[in-house]
Image (cartoon, rainbow, N blue to C red):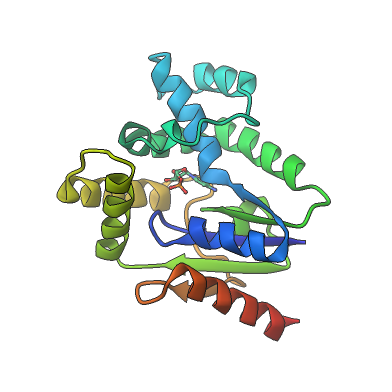
Amino acid sequence: MVITIDGAGGTGKSSSAKLLAQKLGYLHLNSGTLYRWITYNALQQHLNLHDSDVLLSLAKKLDYQNIDQNMVQSPEVSDNVAQVAKIPSIRELVLEIQRQYAQDKDIVVEGRDIGTVVFPDAEYKFYFTASLDIRAKRRYEQLKKNGLEVDYAQIRQSIADRDKQDMEREHSPLRKADDAIEIPTDMITVEEGVDIILAEMQLLG
Ligand code: C5P
């Protein structure tokens, strides 16, 4: 069984996806991490992020089992990942990685295009939303907790820029699948988000 959670950065989908998977005893796949891992390695190697051939050949060689979860969350990766995620050949590769990983598994997969493109036939689909200010605040607190020097206005701008790129790209842009249930998260906690999902799943049967 596949459960998809899509939405923009900072909507709380990662925390909720993780907790939901834990509660159900399912696997959890954060697809953003895959795009971030490619971006992180490309930046490390000073590659041209607009050169799709060079990026694809790097992406094919990477080990996706051992992603450095700390490094991929750096602001530098956040500022560049949408450019890498725009490239159709990179999206195709990541799509295959996700489908292979999820095959015959009970899994919660989160991202931007999971319900629309990667698993259009998923049993349950959810779409998280939240205002830009709330999302920027959450991101700010998270980075500060991780010991990074952060500027709120810069973070807010960076999130707005990434939203724009993710929503306006030609291939699999961020959008709600027609059959996804929308969950606004401005006023709710991670646990409450998970409870809403579990209740909807029971209702849907
Ligand atoms: O979820 P997260 O913020 O870590 O995702 C980082 C970036 O990866 C997104 O801004 C987007 O550009 C890209 N992404 C994507 N499709 C997904 C997941 C992430 O394009 N399914």
Report whether 124 appears left or right of 128: right
Query: What residue sits 58% from the left and 62% below the top?
Result: 19
Looking at the picture, how far across and down is residue 27, in whole percent? 70, 52
Above-or-below relation of 77 to 151: above
Q: Which one is in front, 1 or 143?
A: 143
User: What is the total number of numbered labels drawn onto the structure image?
Assistant: 0
Q: Residue at x 39, y 50 (%)?
A: 168
Nearest to the observer: residue 147 or residue 99: 147
Which quarter of the rendering shows the C terminus?
Answer: bottom right
- The answer to whether residue 51 of the structure is visible from this angle is no
Quadrant of the drawing holding the N terminus: bottom right
Q: In the rendered image, which quarter is residue 76 located in?
A: top left
**Residue shown at the point (59%, 74%) measured from the top left:** 197
Q: Position of residue 186 (x, y in %)?
A: 35, 72
x and y percentages locating residue 82 in the rendered image: 40, 39
Residue 79 shows in the view: yes
Residue pushed farthest bottom? 203
Judging depth in this view, the residue of 83 and 157 nearest the camera is 157
Tell me where residue 180 sits by quadrant: bottom right
Q: Is residue 188 left or right of residue 149?
A: right
Q: Is residue 71 above or below residue 194?
A: above
Residue 187: horizontal and vertical position, in percent?
A: 36, 77
Rendering quarter of residue 59 = top right
Is 69 drawn above or below residue 195 in the view shown? above
